[in-house]
Image: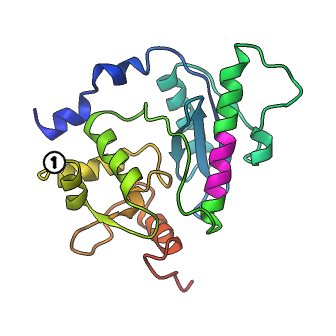
Amino acid sequence: MTIAERQKQPDPRERSERREARAWAWAVSATPIGPLLLAATDEGLVQVVFHAEEKTAAEAVARLTRRLGAEPTSLPSASPASTAPSATAPASAAALPVARCTEQLGEAIRQVESYFAGDTKAFTLPLDWSLITGFNRRVLRELAAHVPYGTVVGYQDLADRVGEPGAARAVGVAMGSNPLPVVVPCHRVVESGGGIGGFGGGLETKRTLLALEGVLPQPLF
């Protein structure tokens, strides 16, 4: 089986993750690279979407609704305080997953804001990997676990790390399919020859993130 076929072939455990409708919540957070849509299930952060102006956000919410099989809880504000469940309201069994989603989302917003403020160097968030499968998931897990803040890795090196030395191009495909950019840092993957490589959020966004982490100089204007 080729790498491309493995990228498309989920294993039975991954398929089972999406059999039932799942509660989830979302909000849009203003950041220095533009609005980010963050979505979380009760398991953790499930998606980050760049350039989440109204149309893009609406399309992302519609896609996630289809993938997760349930209408979301929409939060009117991305303020972390607004995502905290009420301490006084008793939670029914049905409400517990929703409360957990908003709790996970609130923590994600706090850590993303702290990252852009220059305070958080490593995200400590539970992640819901259910939107990504197979080879792509393996590569992204390796990236999240072993390419820290302020460092970069080449596409070929990342392919070598997951035991697929012939899969440098497939690593690029995996980066483009990353449902959790910024938190799972595909902006840290660059060309082995020194080029910045591609980026789903746009090259200026990639440069800004690498400059924030000290890999590239801050732009003059």
The answer to whether 116 appears left or right of 168 in the picture is right
Where residue 161 sits: x, y (%)?
23, 53
In which quadrant will I find the C terminus?
A: bottom right
Where residue 164 sits: x, y (%)?
15, 48
Q: Count numbered badges in the picture.
A: 1
**Which residue is located at x 27 percent, y 48 percent?**
173
- Decide: few, some or many residues near mark 1? Use Cα within 10 Å; few <14, some 14-19, many ≥20: some
Question: Secondary structure beneath disc 1?
Answer: loop
2 versus 193 height, above or below: above
Where residue 57 sits: x, y (%)?
59, 42
170 versus 67 height, above or below: below
**Which residue is located at x 28 percent, y 34 percent?**
134
> Residue tagged by mark 1?
164
Task: Identify which amino acid the numbered label 1 is placed on.
Answer: Glu
In which quadrant will I find the N terminus?
A: top left
78 versus 17 height, above or below: below
Where residue 121 sits: x, y (%)?
54, 63
Name the colour scheme: rainbow
**Which residue is located at x 52 percent, y 81 percent?**
218
The answer to whether 85 appears left or right of 109 in the picture is right
Q: Which residues are magenta?
A: 105-113
Q: Residue furthest bottom?
A: 220
Give the quadrant of residue 73.
top right
